[in-house]
Image: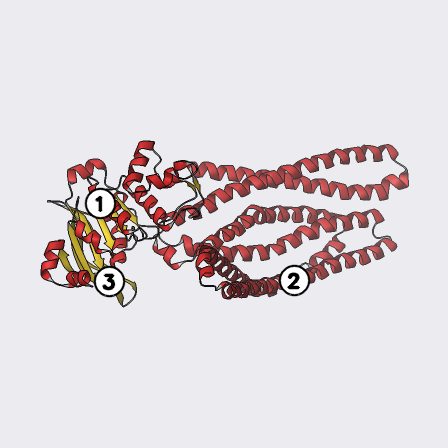
Amino acid sequence: MTVSKNYLKTKKIVLSIIVSSLTMTLISIGSSLFLQLIIDIYIPNLRITQLLVVSTSLFLSYILYALFNYFSGYLSLVLSQKLSIDLLLKYIRHLFDVPIALFNTRRAGELTSRLEDANNIIHTLASTTISAFLNIGTVILIGITLFVLDFKLFLITATLIPLYFLIVYKFMKRFDKLNTKRMESGAKLVSTLIEDIHGMETIKAFNVADSQYHKIDHKFVDQLQKNFMYEKLNVLQSSLKTIVRLSISLLVLSIGALLVIHGRLSLGKLVAFNSLLTYFILPLEEIVNLQSNIQTAKIANMRLNQILNIPKEETLHTITSKELLEFKPSQIIMENIQFEYKYGQPVLNHLNLTIPLGTSTAIIGLSGSGKSTLAKLLIGFYKPTRGETRLQSKTKSINLKNYQQQIVYLPQKPYIFSGTIRDNITLGRFKCIEDAQVEHVAKLAQIHEDIKKLPDGYNTKLSGNDILSGGQQQRIAIARALLSDATILIFDEATSNLDVKTEKSVIDNILQVQNKTIIFIAHRLYIAKKVDQILVMNKGKIIENGTHTQLLKQKGQYYKLLEA
C-alpha cells in the first residue's frame, strides 16, 4: 500500500512538472510569434492600441512563466529528495544487512564512493529523465510551429539534425570506457585516503608520512588524468555539436534572407522562425546531451549493483523467550566444522566442540591456530564451509543463527563511537536504562573511577578514540557487553591492553556474572585457570579439552604453554 502511494505521489509530481514546462513552452512560442506581428502588422499599419494590449498580455504571461518556472524547479527538488530516500537509504540499509565478510573484502572508500554513484543515478532520474520528456514535448510543439511558419526552412533544419546523433554515436564507447576508469580511480583515491587518516598514528610513528603521501599523490594524479581525459572528450564533443548548431542557424538565416529578398517570406516570419529555432535546437541538443548523463548513470548503476546484488544475511526465525523456555537448550555444539577464507586453504578443519550453557570457557592456542575465526563462526560473522553450529536440548536442536540476538562478540580492538561515554556503554539499547545499571557494569569493568575523573563523567563527549587509552576503550566495551541482554558473551583478547592487576579484577568480575555463557579467546593463561573448561587449538583443530587441573596432568600442549 505504501509503495503504491509513493508511486502515485511521484507520478503526480512528474505530471505537474511536465504540465508546467509545456505551459512555459507555449508562452515562449507566443513570444516569438509576437515578433512576427510587430514586424509584419503592427509597425507597418501603426496599430498602437493592439501593440499595447498584446504587450501587456505578454507581460502577464511572462509573470506566469516565472511562476511556472519556480513551480517546476521546486517539484524537481521534491522528486529528487524522494528518489534520494528510496535509493540512498536503500543502499545504506543494505550495508547494514549484508554479511560482515563484505567489510573484510571491500575498503571503506569503495563502499562510500557508491553513495556518489547513487547521486549520479538520482540526478539522471530526477532531472535528466524528466528533462527528456519535457524537451521531447518542446521539440514537437515548436517543430510543428516552425513547420507551419515555413516548411522549407524547417526541412533544411530537419535534414541537419541527424548530425547530432551521429556525433553522439561515435563518442558512446569512449565515454563508457573513460567513465568506468575515472569512477574506479576516484574510489581508490578515497579508500586510500580514509585508510591513511585512520592509520595516521602508525604512519607518524614509523616516520613514513612522505612515502604514504606519495601513494596518495600518485592516485590523485591518476584520477586527475582520467577526469581530464573524460572532460577533454566531453569538450570535443560539445565543440562539434556547437559547429552543427551554428551551421544550422547560419544556413536558415542565409536561405531565409534570400526568400525575404525574393518576396517568398515575410521579414517577420523570418525573425519569428529564427527566434523559435533557438527554442527548437537547444532542447534537441539537451536530448542529445543526455547521452553523457545516461552513460554516467549506467556505469554508476553497475557499480551500485555490485553491492546491492550481494545477498543479505540469511534471515531465520528468531527464537522467542517463550520458545526458549520451552526449548531449554543446555549446550552449544559445533559439529565437523570446516572453514576456509580461500579455496583449498582451510583455517578450521573437522573441528568438533561442546560448550555447556551457563559455563565459562577459554579457547587458547598459538597465533594462527584459528581461535578468532572460531569465535566469528560462533557469532555468525562467517558461515562454515562445512558442518553446523547448533543449540542442543535433551530432545531437539536449533541452528545457533536463530539465537543470534543472544550473542555478543567483543574484539580485541573495540570501536568507540562519537557521543557520550554513556551512549557508548548503552549502545543500541533503546529502552530506558537506569544510571545505576550503567554504573554497575562500569564498576564490573573497572572503568567507573576513570569515568568519574573526566570533565562531565558519563556525559563526557567522545569523538572516536580521542581521549581514551587502549585499556579504557576495552573496559568501556566490556561494560557495553555486560549491559546487553545477550546470554552468550565472547571476549576475543578483549583485555589484552589492561595491566595484569586490572585484568585479573575484570576477569574475576565477568566470571561472577550470573546466567551468562562466557567464552574467552585468550593468550594469557591466567584466564584459563579461572574457567570451567579449556579448549586448546592448534592448526585449526581442538587438540585438548578439559579443566586446568586435567590438562596439567596430561602434560600436553597446554602444559607446554604454561611452562614456556
Query: Which residue is drawn at the image coordinates 78% and 47% (left, top)?
Result: 272
Quadrant assignment, res 340: bottom left
Asked whether 77 or 324 is in front, the reply is 324
The reply, left or right, for residue 39 in relation to residue 514 is: right
**Amino acid under label 1?**
Asp
Q: Is residue 446 above or below residue 221?
A: above
SS for dot 1: helix
Asked whether 103 or 466 is in front, the reply is 466
Q: Is residue 354 above or below residue 512?
A: below
**Measured from the top left, where is residue 43 in percent x and y?**
88, 40
Asked whether 218 or 51 is in front, the reply is 218
Picture quarter with the C terminus: bottom left
Q: Is residue 256 above or below residue 424?
A: below
**Measured from the top left, where is residue 196 in percent x and y?**
47, 58
Q: Nearer the viewer, mark 1 or mark 3?
A: 1
- Return the disc, 3 or 2, that comes first in the chain's sequence: 2
- Return the disc, 1 or 3, that comes first in the chain's sequence: 3
Q: Nearer the viewer, mark 3 or mark 2?
A: 3
**Amino acid under label 3?**
Leu
Query: Which residue is drawn at the image coordinates 33% and 48% (left, top)?
Result: 474
Q: CA distance from mark 3 to mark 2?
A: 63 Å
Q: Which mark is residue 237?
A: 2
- For disc 3, the marked residue is 366
**Measured from the top left, where is residue 72 in percent x and y?**
62, 39
Q: CA distance from mark 1 to mark 2?
A: 73 Å
SS for dot 3: loop
**Amino acid under label 2?**
Gln
Quadrant assignment, res 376: bottom left
